[in-house]
Image (cartoon, coloured by chain):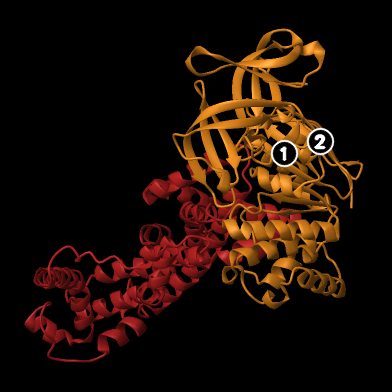
Amino acid sequence: MADARAGYDPFATSGAGARTRAKIGVYIVLVLFAAYFLLPLLVVILNSFRQLPEIAQNGLIAWPRSFNLDGWYRAWNNYCVGGTCAGVQGNFYNSLKMTIPATIISTAIGALNGYILSKWRFWGSEVLFAFMTLGVFMPGQIALLPWAFILGTIGLTNSTYGLILVHTVQGLSFTTLFCRNFYVNIPDDLIKAARIDGAGFWRIFWKIILPLSPPILIVTVIWQFTGIWNEFLYGVVFTSGREQPITASLVALSTNGTNVRDYDVMSAAVLIGALPPLLIYFFGGKYFVRGLTQGAIK
Amino acid sequence: MASLTVRDIRKSFGTVEVLKGVNLEAQSGEFVALVGPSGCGKSTLLAMIAGLETVTHGEIQIGGRTVNSVPPKDRNIAMVFQSYALYPTMTVRQNMLFGMEARGVPKPEREAALKRVSELLQIDQLLNRKPSQLSGGQRQRVAMGRALVRDPDLFLFDEPLSNLDAKLRVDMRMEIKKLHARVGKTTVYVTHDQVEAMTLASRIAVMHKGELQQFDEPQAIYDRPANLFVAGFMGSPSMNFLPGTLGSANGQPAVMLPGANGATVSLPVRLGAVQMQQRPVILGIRPEHISRDGANTNAAGGGLQARLSLPVELVEPTGAETHVVMRLGDREVTARFAPAQAPKAGETVALTLDMSQACVFDAATELAIT
């Protein structure tokens, strides 16, 4: 066991000089790739603080020579999108109103599904699980027409509630898969012991399964939140105007019918739309990785 | 406290029959060990007693009440698992109180039971720790505490010591024995370790391939195994099996064995006269019933002895005793000697066999001939 604890040094195969050279090479490659991936983000951030005339003069990709918050202010408060001049703040709130409930509900149902499919198996439960995971591979556009029909029938078109329903159901494949695969690794003996101790279905779920679940619940919440927040197709198709989530309104914003491209406002609006998932990744990213790699019982 | 009756229990998983009609009973306060190799059905039987597996056929009674369709929580049993199955997010205290909370036992009663059991098992220092902060032996103790605290009718152990290292296993084995002596609960104890079964149980049920082979007191199982399987499974090093023919020598029943260079060795055995017709048999003799000539034999009162000289092939010292492997014809014969009396490999030793302790099995049915 002591051997396993000693770290693995991938450079330990050669002499000291070769090792240093190899490390430098690795870092150069890593820095190049990081720059390549981060450049678009950098351009958008810089442009959101530049003044429009300066962008027009020096081009989109240039070192900023001006600074103001005008783009951010207009994007949030009064930029005109599709005839309404109230910025994207309404759409931002729409996204929150849609994403938070859909994330919570789909995660909760996923946890319950995973618990049942791993610890209370019944005849056909494996087949059922296989069908549910098919949803993971199903492209969202396949469900567009059925959803349009359902939302129309129950009267939830052009409504945030309709999107909550869509995203909750569409997300169940993922949340169920995550939770089921995590719970499968919780020893069955725990459930047996609890049953002998007199606990039933719900007590075992609350007292034993859920307290073990934070790693996978964090993964599921991050996954669902970013996925639903960034989702765009259903938002565009099922809502319009003031009801749109921010991703859909960004499209409307970029196809605004004026001749002048307000790159500063667009950049700021894009960043506003990207901020919540980014924050989640910054603060929850390490838990995400940990949750995916760590088993249920240490 | 309650008795346990298992009547003609069968269990099938699909087309595979894992238990083929097992009958068992444990009297109130008795310690019954279910022993057998892995896959013999002993753990399935225990799970059925616990109510964690459905009964395909037959009847299980606890305290005279048929419990076939009673859910586990209403059987008033407690179980200690091989993995301990301690709830990892709860402290020791919460682990032990969980069952009583689930059953709605009033708080003062819960606390009193917790105090009583944690003192009994000397785990009162550990109550606020999590299972991950405990050593293997401590976890074992807590698992037993969790089982004891509810004052169950029936105590079930599923290979509770197999995750411990050898020394701790012996210590905990003693603790379990002391504990049983103190609380006197009816206990069913599943193990694949025949030493555990021998040391702990008041009666042992030896199982093999879903069938009960023998159900008797430990010494009876060891001395008079009912068949070849039980004889080979109980005891380490295991009993020597020598195929031969049952016949008679000097008017006494004897087993003829093929010796070295085509010679025949005749060993007298103690059998009823009825059994004297010639037939192929297997002679079983335990390593401790073979001693060197001149050594103090502990075969007191046996009287029926045989003498042999055999070449030594291998010597295995274990410290307390030395196992010596010798050759008889094409068979190996193992004996256990005191280290001082152990020969060297290559020597030929003169042996005395205590034939009064030998067993004879029918070669076809593998059942003991008495």
The amino acid pointed to by label 1 is Leu
The furthest residue to the front: B294
Question: Which x, y percent locates residue B22?
Answer: 77, 31
- Identified at 78% across, 36% down, the residue is B220
The amino acid pointed to by label 2 is Leu
Residue that numbered label 1 is attached to: B45
Question: Which x, y percent locates residue B15?
Answer: 63, 25
Question: Which x, y percent locates residue A209?
Answer: 61, 61
Which residue is nearer to you in this view: B171 or A113?
A: B171
- Give the secondary structure at mark 1: helix
Q: Quadrant of the C terminus of chain B?
A: top right
Q: Residue B60's quadrant in the figure?
A: top right
Residue B209 can be seen, yes or no:
no
Which residue is nearer to you in this view: B318 or B261?
A: B261
Q: Is residue B105 above or below residue B290?
A: below
User: Contact, CB < 8 Å: mark 1 with mark 2?
Assistant: yes
Residue that numbered label 2 is attached to: B24
The furthest residue to the right: B64
Answer with left or right where residue A176 lies relative to residue B228. Answer: left
Q: Is residue B340 above or below residue B115?
A: above
- Give the secondary structure at mark 2: strand
For mark 1, name the chain: B
Q: Which chain is orange?
A: B
Which residue is nearer to you in this view: A50 or A137?
A: A137
Q: Which chain is red?
A: A
- Identified at 51% across, 20% down, the residue is B329
For mark 2, name the chain: B
- Identified at 82% across, 44% down, the residue is B70
Q: CA distance from mark 1 to mark 2?
A: 10 Å
